[in-house]
Structure formats: C-alpha cells, structure tokens
Image (spheres, rainbow, N blue to C red):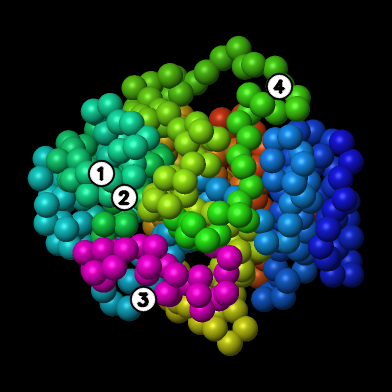
C-alpha cells in the first residue's frame, strides 16, 4: 500500500523518510515517527489513517494509545521525586505506603518495585477491565497481595500492576495523582503532547487501535510458545484481565482512566520530546526537568542477565526504564526507554544525544518487546 508521507526531515536524513514509507509495504495503517539529535528535531513524519476502514487521514497532532511505552515517562515522575529529595530508591516501599508492607512485602525497596522484582506482576483473583478504572480497589488489592516469588530474587514483568504501584507512591508523597504530577513536572514544561489518561476534549484527535487479528496481512501462526508464555505467571500478568485493543483500549472509560502502565496517549513527537530532554541530561532548550545526577540514578542497572519470569527472555532493567537490550535502542548499551505492546516505542541515547518516538495504530503480533520501529532506528544511526 502506498501512502503520502507528511512532515519534515533535516538534510541528510532523507533516507529515514524512505524507510518510514516502506512500513506500509507490510501491515501499517497509520503511524508517526519523530527523532531528535542533540536537542534538535531532525525527523518528524506521519502518514496513513487513524481508522481501520482507512477513511480518516493521520494528522500531525494525532494521538494514539501507546500501551507500555507509557512506563518510561511514568518512571520519570519517580525520578523527579528522587531529584526533589522526596523518595529514596533504597528505602522500603512501606516507609511511604505503610499498608503495602503486609503479606511479606515489608522489605521490598523502591528500586525493586520499579525494576519488576517485587513479585506483584498480577493479582491472583480474577479481574475485569472495569476493575482497572477503580484506583482505590486496585491499590488496596495489591497492598493485600502476597508476592508471587521472593521479592528481589527474580524479575517478572508487571505489565499492568506496575502503574498502580508507582502511582500510589506519587499520591502518598505529593497528595496529587501521577497524572497531575506528570503534567506539572514534565508534559507542560516541555510542551510535550503526552497524556497519561486523556481529557475528553482530546478524544477527537485519537486514532483507533487495530488488533493483530484485523491486520491487512495475517502472519503465519507460531508453532511453539516458550515455557514462560504458557505459565501461570504470564497468565496473571498479561491476561488478567484480557484487554481488547478496540473494545476496551479505545473506550471512553479507558481513555479517561489513570492506568500509568498502559494508557498513555501520545504522538511520536510527544514521546520524542520527552526523551530529547533525557538524552541531553534532563534539559531541552532552556527547560530543565531533572538533573543529570538524578537521571543517572534512575537508569542504574538493576536487572541484567536474568530471564524474566513472565516474558521468558532477558530484559535489562533500570529503575522503571528498560536499558538497551539486544540493540533495540541503537548501538549504545546505556540507551534507555520503554516499548509498548504492538510496536510503539520511545528511548533516549545520552551517548549520542539521540531521542526517538514511534506511535502507530496497527498492532503487531510479536511476543518480543523489540520496537516495531527497529528499521527506523537503524536508519537514524546510519545518517548520524
């Protein structure tokens, strides 16, 4: 399928536009891609359609649900609290949230919680999607939950629960929600079009997610699954509840809710703008959102060679951010960010000053968390 690619690239980055257009030779419907280099925007592209029937053009300011790509900017909120001296990564969670300390969780540290080592990858009781909209219910259930493995002994992806855990910490420490804190400290100062929970006034700008089962081409089904993918931990973390891309993640309730692990809505430009600041030590232009020292603390490697108990593969983790694993974020091992189910991604590479944002509405089927925009990332680095 051929589409009109809109937007701009700086001289020398024309090949990135060509690579972006090639995405529609596969299953892409609508997407945006943005990159910064040393604080300057070098690529800002969009194209395709916001709906499955391909009747509405993707615009420069189109927003889309980016699932777990939300986790990186949400982790930044905790990093800023640390920068302000309000939270210590080595302190126990229960010091800030006393009710959390029951059921064998009294010694879980903030660093362990952020790096998915708390043993709270999901809840053992069956949930509905509607439960996710009830903040107090979710945090109370997590406070009463017994860890599913000895905390600190292993890492397992906290796909949905991670957002409630850190969000409650923000609420306990500031008296406001993570959504409010993030807007005040990050999105508004940077003028970044990134929302955790979306105001209803912004709904008209939203693209609809398209599930892999509705893709224009259907991939060959895998004839295997890893032991982790068929495990009870995977079921609890990834399938309790099952979230349908259109029915649930495009619903009014989902968009309005505060689900800091997975209901961020952004453009690629919004994602990349945040990471552009982080790629430059916390400052973009004349706006500083975090100190370089606090950013170093937030990206300290907490999980390296371990196999994730939920995902069944290695994921290098910092304190909320994924640290570059298998070259997903370019050639530099200290690059950091987060990816989302279906293919969205955002990351910063402080070694080069590169920052990337990619958002799309046609979800891919890969079980890997590797970005669907890998070819675009490679194209950027070839041009630098």
Q: Earlier in the sequence, mark 2 or mark 1?
A: 1
Q: Quadrant of the N terminus?
A: top right
Verify whether residue 181 appears in magenta.
yes
Q: Measured from the top left, where is residue 370 in percent x and y?
A: 61, 41
- State the extent of the magenta-drawn residues as a range: 170-194
Question: Label 4: how many residues lie within 10 Å, few (<14), some (14-19) or many (20+)?
Answer: few
The residue singled out by tag 1 in the image is 138
State whether the magenta stretch is mostly helix, strand or loop: helix
Mark 3 and 4 residues: CB-CB less than 8 Å, in contact? no
The residue singled out by tag 2 in the image is 164
Q: Nearer the viewer, mark 3 or mark 4?
A: 4
Mark 2 and 1 residues: CB-CB less than 8 Å, in contact? yes
- Asked if 381 appears above or below 183 in the picture, the reply is above
Using the numbered discs, state the Cα–Cα distance from disc 3 to disc 4 in whole angstroms.
Answer: 45 Å
Q: Earlier in the sequence, mark 3 or mark 4?
A: 3
**Front position in the image: 168 or 156:** 168
Using the numbered discs, state the Cα–Cα distance from disc 2 to disc 1 in whole angstroms.
Answer: 7 Å
């Amino acid at each position: 399928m051929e589409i009109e690619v809109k937007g701009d690239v700086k001289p020398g980055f024309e090949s990135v536009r060509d690579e972006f257009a090639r995405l529609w030779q596969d299953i892409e419907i609508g997407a945006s891609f943005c990159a910064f280099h040393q604080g300057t925007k070098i690529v800002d592209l969009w194209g395709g359609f916001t709906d499955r029937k391909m009747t509405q053009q993707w615009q420069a300011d189109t927003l889309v649900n980016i699932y777990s790509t939300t986790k990186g900017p949400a982790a930044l909120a905790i990093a800023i609290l640390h920068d302000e001296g309000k939270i210590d990564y080595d302190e126990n969670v229960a010091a800030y949230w006393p009710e959390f300390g029951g059921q064998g969780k009294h010694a879980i540290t903030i660093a362990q919680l952020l790096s998915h080592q708390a043993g709270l990858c999901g809840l053992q009781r069956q949930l509905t999607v509607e439960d996710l909209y009830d903040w107090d219910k979710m945090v109370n259930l997590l406070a009463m939950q017994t860890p599913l493995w000895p905390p600190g002994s292993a890492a397992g992806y906290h796909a949905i629960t991670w957002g409630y855990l850190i969000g409650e910490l923000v609420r306990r420490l500031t008296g406001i929600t993570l959504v409010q804190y993030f807007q005040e400290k990050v999105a508004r100062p940077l003028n970044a079009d990134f929302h955790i929970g979306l105001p209803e006034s912004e709904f008209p700008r939203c693209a609809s997610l398209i599930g892999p089962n509705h893709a224009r081409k259907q991939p060959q089904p895998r004839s295997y699954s890893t032991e982790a993918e068929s495990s009870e931990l995977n079921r609890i973390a990834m399938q309790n509840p099952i979230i349908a891309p259109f029915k649930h993640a495009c619903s009014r309730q989902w968009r309005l809710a505060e689900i800091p692990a997975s209901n961020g809505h952004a453009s690629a430009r919004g994602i990349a703008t945040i990471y552009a600041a982080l790629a430059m030590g916390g400052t973009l232009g004349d706006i500083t959102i975090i100190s370089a020292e606090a950013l170093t603390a937030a990206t300290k490697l907490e999980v390296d060679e371990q196999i994730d108990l939920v995902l069944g593969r290695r994921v290098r983790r910092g304190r909320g951010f994924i640290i570059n694993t298998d070259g997903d974020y370019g050639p530099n091992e200290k690059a950091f960010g987060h990816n989302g189910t279906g293919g969205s991604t955002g990351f910063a590479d402080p070694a080069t000053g590169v920052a990337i944002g990619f958002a799309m509405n046609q979800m891919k089927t890969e079980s890997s968390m590797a970005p669907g925009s890998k070819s675009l990332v490679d194209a950027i680095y070839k041009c630098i």
